[in-house]
Image (spheres, rainbow, N blue to C red):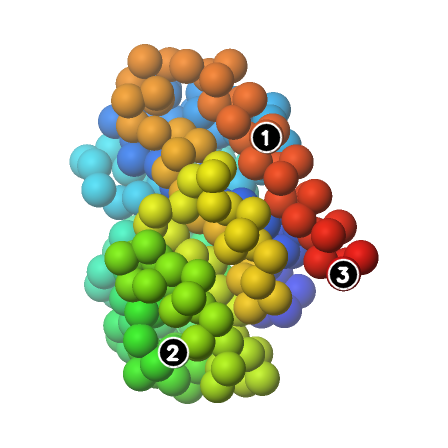
Amino acid sequence: MQASDSPVREQLLQRRVVPVAVADSVEDAVSLARALVEGGLPLIEITLRTPCALDCIRAIRQACPEALVGAGTILDPSQVKAAIEAGAQFGVSPGVNPEVVRAAGEQQLFFIPGIMTPSDIESALRLGCRILKFFPADAAGGIKMLKALAGPYESAGARFIPLGGISPANMSEYLALPVVAAVGGSWLCERKMVREQKWAEITALAAAAVAKAAAGAVGRTNG
């Protein structure tokens, strides 16, 4: 489900940057969320790749209520239920699993499936999803691929969040595409930086990303 009045959708379209993190401890996850909020990015995707991931989501919701926190790498319906119970406000998957998307819809979780091919896009559209994760973006053709996909699917309402190979060096080029809703990236909160607790550096990266995204939005409007 992707309700048009969802606060997640509003933040995605406003901030246009989604930090994606792998968290190894609850304490670091909370500090990370606070660092991102301080840098102007009140949303974060915690991937379900570590044993403590659900606890991290739960802790962020309690300790940092101003942040929108989502669960990434959701691969089966049971993880949808677990993510919601932990307090996740949105969900993300690397592919389009109809059972997962339907489970999210039944439980009214804003859900972003991953796509890479035209067939993936059509499957997602049939399931009612219009904002789609393009993954792995760089390996799948990057900007050239997105431009090609825009032709048949932009008019159907498809908008993409590329993830995989996105960095400060190319994010503006991606965000300049009308078909791109936002970009996702781990460069904002790399696992090593989180482990080393470089919160000031993460805050600075978040602020720089927000500024770049805002500048790109102005450029598109003026253009």
Query: Which residue does the numbered mark 2 point to in the structure image?
Result: 121
Q: Is residue 19 left or right of residue 206?
A: left
Report the residue at 69% width, 44% height from top: 214
Query: Which residue does the numbered mark 3 point to in the structure image?
Result: 223
Q: Quadrant of the C terminus?
A: bottom right
From the viewer's side, name the closer residue of 26 and 129. Answer: 129
Of badges 2 and 1, the one in the foreground is 1
Q: Position of residue 206 (x, y in %)?
A: 54, 30
Earlier along the polypeptide chain: callout 3 or callout 2?
A: 2
Residue 208: assigned label: 1
- Amino acid at dot 1: Ala
Check disc 3: other Cα within 10 Å, few if <14, some if 14-19, many if 20+.
Answer: few
From the viewer's side, name the closer residue of 183 and 76. Answer: 183
Check disc 1: other Cα within 10 Å, few if <14, some if 14-19, many if 20+.
Answer: some
Of badges 3 and 1, the one in the foreground is 3
Earlier along the polypeptide chain: callout 3 or callout 1?
A: 1
